[in-house]
Amino acid sequence: MLKINAPNYLYCPFCKSQLAQREDEEIIRKYCPKCLWVYYPQAFDSVAAVITRNGKMLMVKRIREPFKNSWMFPGGFIEFGEHPEDTLKREVKEECGLKILQSKLIEVVQTSDDFRAPGNLVFFYKVKTSGRKIKTDNEENSDIRWFGIKKAPKIGWKSQKYILKKFFLDSKEE
């Protein structure tokens, strides 16, 4: 991780209220007590782990907007100065309780459907993990499940639908 500092914002960019601090995902973050905006200093890039095993894919159900109550590949924003592969390891552990054995970058997709980070780049990795017991981060997700590759649940993100279609539905992989 690079040793650099994020900008030091004092006021909310949306409602102009003074920012306060609180712990969020084990990190002290600035947030707006009035409109509840949380400042996540990052490069506006994210990762997604496409974890498959025995013809099934692992997905988590979001409890936050955007796309609340839809399913997604485990993943999240790259923290300021963090490498995408380090983010991938952190997110898979946080959201699935699993350790990565092997990962391979399969595609980088620029998104337009996340109001928090228009133009966000998502690094999609095909991931092999160790461990059988899955558990999710209840602050971010309400559920975690294996789904048949041809029986995907409701997915909100366009980029995730694209990856699912390109690498699984249009391919011979089961």
Image: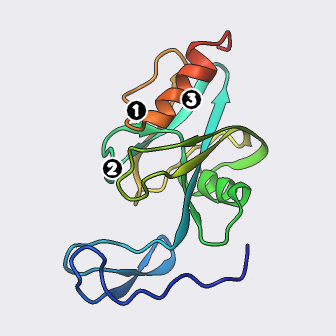
What is the distance, in whole Å, between disc 2 and disc 1 at their CAs?
11 Å
Q: Quadrant of the C terminus?
A: top right
Amino acid residing under circle 2? Pro
**Dot 2, crowdedness within 10 Å: few (<14), some or many (≥20)?**
some
Amino acid residing under circle 3? Ile
Name the one closer to the observer, 172 or 100.
172
Q: Quadrant of the N terminus?
A: bottom right
Name the one closer to the observer, 24 or 31.
31
Residue at left 66%, top 72%? Answer: 81
Name the one closer to the observer, 164 or 54.
164
**Residue 142: image location, x then y, percent:** 37, 47
Q: Which mark is residue 66?
A: 2
- Sequence-first disc among 1 and 3: 1
Q: Which mark is residue 113?
A: none
**Dot 1, crowdedness within 10 Å: few (<14), some or many (≥20)?**
some
**Residue 138: image location, x then y, percent:** 41, 56
Local SS, label 3: helix
What is the distance, in whole Å, between disc 2 and disc 3 at their CAs?
19 Å
Task: Please report contact status of discs 2 and 3: CB closer than 8 Å, yes or no.
Answer: no
The residue mark sitting in front, 1 or 3, is 3
**Residue 53: image location, x then y, percent:** 67, 27
Tag 1 residue: 155
- Sequence-first disc among 2 and 3: 2
Residue at left 53%, top 39%? Answer: 73
Tag 3 residue: 163
Local SS, label 1: loop
Residue 86's place in the image compared with 98, above or below, is below
Residue 20's place in the image compared with 67, above or below, is below
Residue at left 62%, top 51%? Answer: 92
Task: Please report contact status of discs 1 and 3: CB closer than 8 Å, yes or no.
Answer: no
Q: How is the image coloured?
A: rainbow
Local SS, label 2: loop
